[in-house]
Image: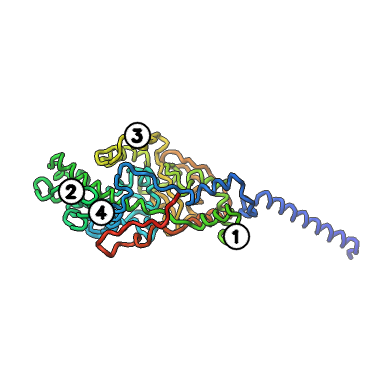
Amino acid sequence: MISYASRTRWLWSGTLTLLALAAAFLIALADNCEHLGLCPPAPWSADELALLRSMTLDNIPPPPASPSNRVADNPRAAALGHRLFFDSRLSANGKISCASCHRPENHFSESQTRGRAIGFTERNTMSLVGSAYSPWQYWDGRRDSLWSQALTPLEHPAEHGGNRMEYVRFIAADPQYRAAYESLFGPLPDLSDHRRFPLAATPIHNESWQRAWREMTPEDQHAVNRAFANLGKAIAAYERLLLPGPSRFDAYVSAVLAGDEKQQQALFSEGEIRGLRLFIGPAKCIDCHNGPLLTNNEFHNTGLLSYSAELPDRGRRAAITRVLADPFNCSGLYSDASEQDCLELRFMRTGKELLGAMRTPSLRNLANTEPFMHKGQLNTLMEVLEHYNQAPAAMIGHNETKPLKLGRRQLKNLESFLHTLSGSIDVEPKWLVPPTSSEPATVTRTHKPG
């Protein structure tokens, strides 16, 4: 039989062992709480506050000037562009408009792996919201302005599938479109002589259309190109109005800067705060996703795989030749810019490090824009975070990222934070649906940044 003294010693020994284990656990927890995503939120430092302030829409300037487009900020051009953007008659089958892939309800992107119009495009559809701030368009930057980008789908066989001659004829034949166009750009060319101006013609894609184009005089080709370019400039004037509105993240930062702790607690959970700390800290997301739009608009290879049946995507490296050869680029005949205005084009990077690189997308309004990445390879935000956490080797070029080695809870906190970046689109609601009236509306901005 165990004596009372022995039993007491045994109980004390067991208790001390448990206390020692508990202490060791608490010490280990304290040492690893960051990795486990359990650290209590600490006050923001002065440097962190400066970073947070730089990421809010309160800090966004007006969209930069577009010297290659003299009507970029003309309200009447935006009204014309708005109508063109939603008009499905600007397509070979009469069913495809710009909004077919850039859907307002999907933040002016599309919830498909790739854009779907007459056929399927090569890549996922990027959102147009905030695109006025980028000097390059598309994932690979193969166009250097919104207006030159707007022209490309109109003639692509898998998108609108038409040709520039038909589009210019369509505008000329519609009294309201013609009046709106000529009030901005002057008289359209007289297309009545079909020997000079065939019914269908373009220098690209369709062989018979190309043959008809080659039979035109250079002067007549120039007249059609000029009118076609002007359609793109009007569409771009509308697209420049598509700006992100404030999100819960912006409201939280305002509360932090104001020292309003009650409002901070109402806006952000502890997990979202931890996710934000990771975003600007150990996860290094802010290295590329910075500024009010959470993008540096640069090109990076992050080791994303193409689909198994495809060759690796050469990305920006292949697009350099295309943007230089584009007749509608900043230095082209149809640009309104001087050579001095085209610095981005003249001094763009062309190095081998751009092989497989893609443009950094904005992280604002991620909701309803999945799947993610340039070919829709990743279906959820967690898949995106796990990709960066592992940083696999690139199939082509060199993956710039390094493994983050974050814990599961840290990834969940990052995911929670990313959901706080959704907000409204900063344009009057009447601009987000096809117009019901044939009369052009006037542009009204609900918020002027800066």
Whole-angstrom CA distance, mark 3 to mark 1, is 49 Å
At 47% from the left edge and 57% from the top edge, which residue is drawn?
A: 422
Whole-angstrom CA distance, mark 2 to mark 1, is 60 Å
Report the amino acid beneath label 4: His
| Residue matched to label 4 | 160
At 41% from the left edge and 41% from the top edge, which residue is drawn?
A: 357
Report the amino acid beneath label 2: Pro
| Residue matched to label 2 | 187
Query: In terms of sequence position, does the residue under pointer 4 or pointer 1 come before the other?
Result: 4
Whole-angstrom CA distance, mark 2 to mark 3, is 33 Å
| Residue matched to label 3 | 346
- The x, y position of residue 307, in whole percent, is 38, 49
Query: In terms of sequence position, does the residue under pointer 2 or pointer 3 come before the other?
Result: 2
- In front of the other: 7 or 262: 262
Report the amino acid beneath label 1: Gln
Label at residue 222: none
SS at badge 1: helix
Label 2 or label 3, whichever lies nearer to me, is 2
Label at residue 265: 1
Whole-angstrom CA distance, mark 4 to mark 3, is 31 Å
Whole-angstrom CA distance, mark 4 to mark 2, is 26 Å
Q: Quadrant of the N terminus?
A: bottom right
Q: Left or right: 416 with respect to 396?
A: right
Q: Left or right: 414 with respect to 208?
A: right
Q: Around disc 3, counting alpha carbons within 10 Å, would you say few (fewer than 14), some (14 to 19), or many (20 or more)?
A: few
Report the amino acid beneath label 3: Arg
Query: In terms of sequence position, does the residue under pointer 2 or pointer 1 come before the other?
Result: 2
Query: In terms of sequence position, does the residue under pointer 4 or pointer 3 come before the other?
Result: 4
Whole-angstrom CA distance, mark 4 to mark 1, is 49 Å
Query: In terms of sequence position, does the residue under pointer 3 or pointer 1 come before the other?
Result: 1
